[in-house]
Structure formats: C-alpha cells, structure tokens
Image (cartoon, rainbow, N blue to C red):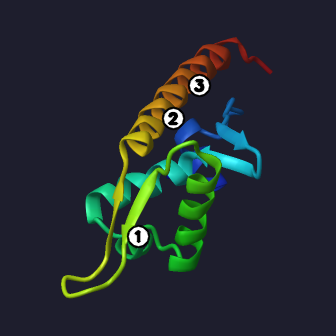
Amino acid sequence: MHEDKSTHQKKTGGMPTVRGRIWIDGPEGTFFGHGRAVLLERIIEHGSITKAAKSMDMAYRHAWDLVDSMNRQSKEPFVEVATGGKGGGGARVTKAGERAIKMFWRFHKDLQAFLTREQKKFKL
C-alpha cells in the first residue's frame, strides 16, 4: 500500500529516509510490480477481476489492462478467465502467477532489508 508524504514524514519524525520500489520491466514496459502483485493476490481472494479491482478502488478496465499486459508479456498466462454463463464468469491466478507473486515479495523483502541497512548509514 502506497503511503503519502505526510504519513511517511509522521512515521519518521520528519527525518530524511531512504526508500525504494521494485518494478520488473518486460518488452512492453512495466511487467510486474507492487500494484500488480496485490491485484493478483486480490484475484486469488475474490475469484474475480471485477471484485479484485473494486477491493483496490481501481477501475475494472485498468485492472483488466494490467492482467492483459502481464499475460501478454509472460511465457505462461498469470490469470485465466472464464466468461459468463449460468454461474457467472470468474478468474483464477495460475501457478505461473503464484510464482510471480512469491518472487516479487521476496525481491521486495530483500530491497526493504537493503534500504534499512543503508538508512543506518545516512547522516545529514
């Protein structure tokens, strides 16, 4: 979850902090990052791109575009969708998508540990 500057400054007592984010680029630009990892987790939780998008206050079209981008840029799709019908449609995150989520959070954890170490060196 992204925090605004004022919230971050309150947490740090107004002192400068070292921060960073990870984006994994693909042939079309951004392939994977924080928002996409959370979106996939929400699809797992809700079984639907629509419900996942709503839970993130994200427009369905934007969520669909992110899913489509990940699926196009990956060797294997991250999300499979089922169209309407009697029970309605739905979406499920594939094994490839689950691996991407785990890989991203491992990178994120490593980056946060690095930033914490670097913060200790930062003196003004």
Q: Residues within 10 Å of mark 2 (few under 14, many from 20)?
A: many
Residue 64, by quadrant, is: bottom right
**Residue under the point 43% across and 40% down:** 96
Relative to 71, 101 lies left or right: left
**Residue under the point 76% across and 52% down:** 28
- Name the amino acid, label 1: Ile
**Residue under the point 34% across and 70% down:** 48
**Residue under the point 59% across and 45% down:** 74
Residue 13, by quadrant, is: top right
Disc 1 vs disc 2: Cβ atoms closer than 8 Å?
Answer: no
Q: Is residue 2 visible?
A: no
**Cα distance in 3D space between marks 2 and 3:** 10 Å
* Lower sequence index among marks 1 and 2: 1
Quarter occupied by the C terminus: top right
Disc 1 vs disc 3: Cβ atoms closer than 8 Å?
Answer: no
Q: Secondary structure at mark 1?
A: helix
